[in-house]
Structures are given as C-alpha cells and as structure tokens.
Image: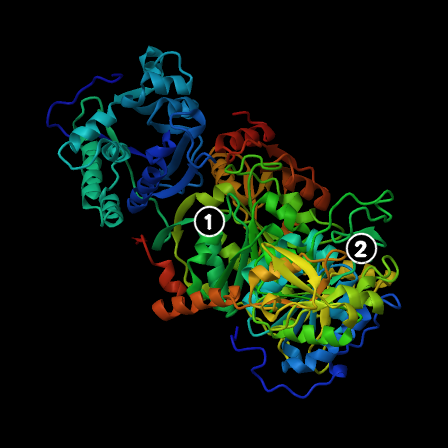
Amino acid sequence: MSASGPGAAEARRYTKRDFESDQDVRWCPGCGDYAILSAVQKTMPDLGIPRENIVFISGIGCSSRFPYYMNTYGFHTIHGRAPAIATGLRLARPDLKVFVVTGDGDGLSIGGNHLLHVLRRNVDVTILLFNNRIYGLTKGQYSPTSELGKVTKSTPMGSADRPVNPLAFALGCGATFVARTVDRDVRHMEEMLKRAAHHKGAAFLEILQNCNVYNDLAWNLLYDREAKLRSQLTLEAGRPLLFGPPDDRKAVVMEGVSPKVVPAAGLGERELWVHDERNVNAAKILADLWAPDFPIPVGVLLDIEAPVYEELLIEQERRAIADRGPGDLAALLVSGDTWKIE
Amino acid sequence: MSETVAPAKGAVKPRRELERAVVRFAGDSGDGMQLTGEQFTTESAWAGNDVATLPNFPAEIRAPAGTLFGVSSFQLQFGSQRVYTPGDRLDCLVAMNPAALKVHLGDLKTGGLLIVNTAAFDKRNLDKAGYAQNPLDDPALAERYRLHKVDMTALTLEAIRDLPLNQKEKERTKNFFALGLVSWIYTRPLEPTVEWIRKRFAKRPEIAEANLRVLKAGHAFGETAEFFNEHYTVEAAEMAPGLYRAMTGNRALAWGLLAAAERSRLPIVYGAYPITPASSILEELALHKRFRIRTIQAEDEIAAVTAAIGASLGGAVGVTGSSGPGIALKGEAIGLAVMAELPLVVFDIQRAGPSTGMPTKPEQADLMQALYGRNSESPVVVLAPATPGDCFYIAYEAVRIAVKYMVPVIVLSDGFLANSSEPWLIPDLGTLPPIEVKFRTDPEGFFPYLRDPATLARPWVRPGTPGLEHRIGGLEKQDVTGNISYDPENHDHMVRTRAEKVRRVAQEIPPTTIHGPATGDLLVVGWGGTYGAITAAVERAQAEGLSVASVHLRYLNPLPPDLGQILREYRKVLVPEINSGQLVRVLRSEYLVDAVGFNRVRGLPLATEDILEAIMQLTGRPA
C-alpha cells in the first residue's frame, strides 16, 4: 500500500489510442455514450498518470459498460454499488486513480445511498454520472430524474414521482466538486472531465446524455442551437452570470434571498452576480435553476478542498505505528491477563 | 434460614471436593452481573480449572430496572476435567432481585444452592417481577433448594459505612459482595479480582477501596455466617501445558485476521455495518491499526461487503462481518466475488431469526443461507469454528483459502461463540501454515482467467502492474480470456469450473478426527458452537458403555473427503443442530445416509442432557 500519488512514476507520453480497449463497443448507434467515451479517452493523457494506475469502476446500466472499453484496469460490478467498491479500493490502494462511471438509475436510485456516502466522506474518486432521464438497458422505464408525468412503459398514464436534481443532491451530500456538462458539447465536456479528474476528493460530474432510443432529445434545450442560446448559462469562475443572445442578454441576480432573471442592459457592475466556485451557498442556489423560469447552468458550480476520508484513516494508521511501533502479534497474544499451566 | 447446622466457633468448615460446578449470577442489567461472572471466571482459570462461560444479557441498552426482560446473567462451568460447555442445570444460582429469581429458578437443580439478596425483594420489585407474594416466604422454596437469604445490600453498606461515597455508589458495589461470597463457597483465589479492582479504579482510589472491602466482606461472610456449613474445592484440570488467556469468539476472529495479515504480509480491509452480535469484531479490529488493518464502518451491509471486494480488487484481503440479516443483504455482492473470482472472507455471527428475531440469542440456522442463499449457481467455501478459541484458527484458515483459491469464504460463528470465553492456549505463531500470495506481474501469456492447474484459481493482479491492464466484472465471461461471453457451452463450463474450484478446497482438509470408536452403533455429527454440548454428551454416553462416537465438522463446503466413508462405519447417524434440520439434510442428500436430526431452536445453546437423551433413544438405551 504505497501512499505515493498516482502520477509518481514518470508517465509515458500517451495518446487517445492508448486508452482504447480491444473490446467491441456495444451501445446503440447514435448513443450519447460514444461521445463521452471518446472525450474520456482523449483527456486521459492529460492526467499524466501511468495507465496501469488508473481504475474504472461501474455498476449496472448502459453507462456501466464503460470500463470494458477503457484500456486501463476496470471492474464492472453490481447495480448501484460502484461508489462503495471504489471506497474500499481507495482505502486499500491510495496510490491508484479511481473513476466511478454511473447513471441516473444506478447512481441516484438503487445506489443513491452509496453516492450520498462517497460524497460526504470525500473519498478521492472522480464520479461521472450519465444522466439520460430514462432506464435504457432495461428498455425504457422512467428513472429518478425523469420529469413528473413522464409516460413510459412502466408509467403508461405518466409517472407520479417528482424527479431528483443530481447537482442539488450532490451539494446536499457535502460534495467538494460539483459540475455539469453536455454530451454534445465536446470541448466543454473535455474541459469538465479534466477539472473533475484533477480535483482532490470526491468530484461529481453530471453529464447530460442523450438516449436516442428511449428518450431522444430529452436535453433539446441544450442541443438545439437557438434554444441553447436562450437557455444555457455557462458558468465561469470570476465572470458574471450572463446568458442569452447578444440582442437579448440577461443576468441572474439575487433579490433578497431569491435568484431572479433581469435584463443585463443597464446593470451596474456591482449589481451583477459574479460566479465564485468556492461559494457553497451560491452553488446550492445555482443547482436549483432550471428552464423555463431560469437558465440551465452548465460548468463548475463548486470546487473546494476538504479532508479526504482515506487519507485521514491512513494518517491514523501512520500515527499509531509512529507512536507504538508496528503491530506485533506475538506480543499482543500475551498481553493482559495470562496464566501458565505446567 | 434453610440450613441451621452451625459449626463450632473457630472450627474450619469442611471442604468437599467436586469434579465440576455450574454457577449462574443473575440480576438486573445494572447489577454488574457480567463483570461478576467474568471475574469469577478469571479466578477459576487461575485455580487451574477448565472453564466455559455463557453471558446472557437483554438486547435493550438500559432495560427498565427490576423487570423480567431486564434480567442479565452470566453462567459458567468449571471443572477438574475437560469442560465442554457452560453446563445445563445449575449447581448454584445467585439471584440479586425477584425478576432474576423468576427467570432463572427453573434451571436450578433440586437441592442446588440458591443465594438471594433479600434487600431487593420489596413490594415494588416483587410487583415488577409479577410475584403476588414474596416467594422467599414460601417454605417450599427452602425445601426444594438450599436457600440462603442474605441482605447483601445492608452488609455491603455496613462494610463501607465510613467511606466518602454517596448511597448509590455504595450500593453499586454489592456485586462484589456476591462475588466474594461465591468465591469463598468454591474456594476461588481472590488475587486476580483484587488486582483487577486496583487497576480498573486506579484513578478512583475511594471506589477501589470500597470494592475491595465489599469483596472481602462477602468472602468473610461465607467463612463466618453460621448457615454456610460447608464449601467446595474443584481441583486443577489436566490441561496441555503452556501459557493461557481467556478468549471470546469475536476477539479470536479479529485476532485470527491479525495473524493472517502478519503472515501473508497483505493488508486487510474490514468493512462492516454495526449489528448484534458481530459489532465487537469491528470494534476490536479498529483498535489494531498498527497491524495495517483498515476498517470501514460502512453506510449499510451492502457497502460493507462491496468495499471489501473493492479492497480485494486492489490486492488487499477484503473481509466483512455481520449476522444473518446482514448476510442476506450481502448475497448479491458475494455472488459478484464468486463471478469475479476475487478473495473475500465473510463472517456470519448467527443469531436467532428470521427477520430481526432474537438478536442476542444464538442459532445455527444460516447454514443453508451460506451454502445456497444467492441467485443462481454460486458456490462458496463455508467454514465453522467449534469453540471460541477455534475462531482464531478458522479466521486464519478462511483468509488462507480465500487468497489461495480466489474465492469467497463464509465463516459461520454464532452469538454463543461470539461472547462466551474459554481458557485458550496461546499458540506458537510459527506453527500456523504459511499464507503465500504471488501476484501476477508477468505480461507474457497473461489472461485474466488463466487457471492454476491445481487450485483452478485465476491470477491475482494488483492494479498498478504495467502491461496487465484488464477488465473483470459480473457478466459471464469466456474462460481463460475473460471476455464477455453468452455462449451456452462456455456458461455450462464456467458453472462447473466455479463449483470444481470450491470442491478442490477439499485437498486442504486434514483427516477427520473421530471422537470415539472408528466403527459402532452411533455417530453424532455436529458443526459450529454445539461442539462442547455434543462432546460432553458423547463422552457421558461412552462412559455408560455405549458404542458412540462423534465427528465435528469445521469444513462445511466442501465437506471432508473422508466423511462419506466414516458415516458408513456406524449403524445410525445423529445430527444435533440449533435449527430445524439443515446439516442433516445436506448429509442425507450428499451421502444417501439415513441420518436423523436432533433439533431445538430456542435461542439457546443445546443442552448436553438433551443430546444424551437423544443418543440413548437412538441406541435403544433410554436414559
């Protein structure tokens, strides 16, 4: 259990191809997962980590096939449990770079509890949650992020559940890095992947992903050029919250304790809301913004530092050994009350 | 007073030698009965006796005082011969209040010693225990038992009248009065308790002083009170020479893991969610960070086992522990370890069920769950310790097999083994078999499911090894390459291969020890925590001249390779279990032998008497 960082060894110069496995990719043609896979493979060399020190862990669902296609170490596990498996792996091997690939059903329904705890503990893993608002692998039932009233095979008269907001959930769990990107915005996605992967602690990246078979264009507000221009709020650290076409620029500002959309024209600099990735309270307000009343935020909502679970535990171990020496079982066995029989 | 024969003043009271005795201390949860029992056990171990204990306490953290369900007790048997169990019927019962008397009197032998603290028999406590009248006033009680009514509270207060403690603190020391008195009755050395009190209360000298005085007052009371006309000695037992310590099952499991970590040079990650009666393993391991044992108190049972599996993926030994309800939740993940062919050790500290059942009471009803309680064909190795001390060796063996065969191993302990203790001969660690792990590092000819020809184990690769990057998972895969495969023939082959791998663990099993004649009328086959009761019953049957032997299984899957032949050497086979007949079913189906079950599912260890009776019946010699 070396505690040296994943990049300790001199990394060779990789290209995208070095991260492509020899397995046939089995997603449906046109699936948003292809773009995500390509972006992940493309950003891997940027990590500067030897390929053998990278592990991808997934649960069950379309997204969870992901590890098979990465030429790294990988473990395709059981439904919802990838965060817990990753926690055990990180505690045993803090020298490895660990990714968790999950979906809206895997991460927020069957595995919601584990996602909560991996985030609150701030285990050093990068979590990619592909959100397509539908169950794909089981062929088209509604998911915990599907909108209220969603008509699917299992809800012919519309679903009766209100959806969960993944970003608000992650922030509520105490996540230290929370971001959103879109599968069709490759450049933004690559940037977000890099940011998430470089974060120390649990990084949560929601990737809005298209299921063209069971829930096509669920994110059309961010796909359609015109709609996107009006709906997407691209977050950038230190920049004001402005969105909309040039002839109709708008700003998100705070009025009392509530966010509000106002015309940007005529706003003084001091009235603008400047994005601060280190402000947890602001991130929580941003996480809840959604169309049509508000723009849809895309980018890094929060990026802060906090103690990392496995590092705290390993530090306790180091301290115990420093104080009292490494464990000696023979000594332990004869400690306390003993008696001799001749 | 039931006994009025008084020795002449100054005369030494006669001592009678006993071969063994069974004593139970019972009182309110707040009366300190566990502590009293543990100290009496230590004294008996010092005296050189063999000892077996049975702590029994309510599940409620602070049960209301004086109630029947708030009664806590500690039983032990000590003897000059091998003692296999805490005993069935009591020679001596100490009842600190009416509720304790009501709950436990039925277990006292006719003519047994009954010592009660009369101070607690007031109207309030009698009402709570459901006594309309004071049972101590019933002359039948004194006729049936050797009843000693002692106002322990008053005698305690008198002994420490001058100490600067409040009334409550003073009253709380009365358990040491009981301990001192019973120590006198059975001629136990007080030194270990004196030493313990001094150490325990080093920072509260006034409390230490009070406890010591009360202990000695109890002892002196036995010597001088006129109604205790005799007392007893139990000679030292003949035990293997060496250094001993008291050992409980859960601590032994934890220490067995420490031994495995030290010998294998592998780190261990223990994932657990608190559950009775398994939590103390997590707590014990958390104390030993210096051994590179890393513990996770997980968010739930599933996270506990999957974190362990994640650790195994990383080249550590993943271990999880729980009780039956938790094991049920872990089932799917254990199947993942079967499929991914990763080492995993699972402790199941069985308790009475189903569902929440009786969490603090033992049972042996998870055997079928361990063998078959997962979806599809999901074979795992199953081991079971026989005694508290054996838990050490079983935990070690579980790790050894898990890493050698790349397979999950379930260990079936129970709530009785977990909490009871026995004198444990401290082992020479050099005598433990080696645990050898060779991680694969050579990329030449590597495939994730390439198998060792002897064990069928696939290679264990630590992530971080260059050139061996590969993917595994829960999907069926082609043998050797590990590529995902839905091929029908391959699946059939893999199902058989996973089963064969577990079967081959049989080559690790030593020849079965037969306790008794190698052939005869009856073989008694047991497993797990019933070892003591079965062995004691079989020895008594043998002493009666019956042709009876016993075999105790520590390997339940696979079964010992010589078991089938052994079973055929006896006319009848009896299988006592604390379930409604699980091992007996396995033996019948595996060996087509007409084995008969003896089953009591009362949340209690099996009684030697009951097993003996079953033996007598089967051999046509009714007791």
On the rendered image, what quadrant is the N terminus of chain B found in? Answer: top left
| Residue A247 picture location, percent across and down | 78, 70
Chain identifier of the residue bearing label 2 in the image = A
Does residue B157 appear left or right of residue A259 in this picture? left
Q: Secondary structure at mark 1?
A: helix
- Image point (63%, 44%), residue name: B367
Could you say which is closer to the camera, residue A33 or residue B172? Answer: A33
Mark 1 is surrounded, within 10 Å at the Cα level, by few (under 14), some (14 to 19) or many (20 or more) other residues, namely: some
The residue lying furthest to the front in this view is: A266
Q: Nearer the viewer, mark 2 or mark 1?
A: 2
Q: How many marks?
A: 2
The label shown at residue B280 is 1
Query: Looking at the image, is B365 positioned above or below residue B257?
Result: above
Image coordinates for residue B27, horizontal then vertical, percent: 36, 29
Q: Which residue is pictured at 55% across the width and 52% down the height?
A: B321
Kindly identify the amino acid type of the residue bearing the numbered disc 2: Tyr
Q: Is residue B186 visible?
A: no
Of B365 and B548, the residue lying toward us: B365
- The location of residue B115, given as percent across then percent down, is 30, 25
Residue B528 falls in image quadrant:
top right
Q: Residue at x 25, y 37 (%)?
A: B187
Q: Is residue B608 above or below residue B288?
A: above
Secondary structure, mark 2, is strand
As measured in the structure, the alpha-carbon distance from the residue carrying label 2 to the one carrying label 1 is 41 Å
Does residue B225 appear anywhere in the picture? yes
- Identify which residue, B354 or B41, lies in the foreground: B354
Label of residue A135 in the image:
2
Name the spot of residue B60 as percent of width and height, x first. 46, 35
**Which residue shows up at 85% across the image and 49% down it?**
A152
The amino acid sitting under disc 1 is Ser
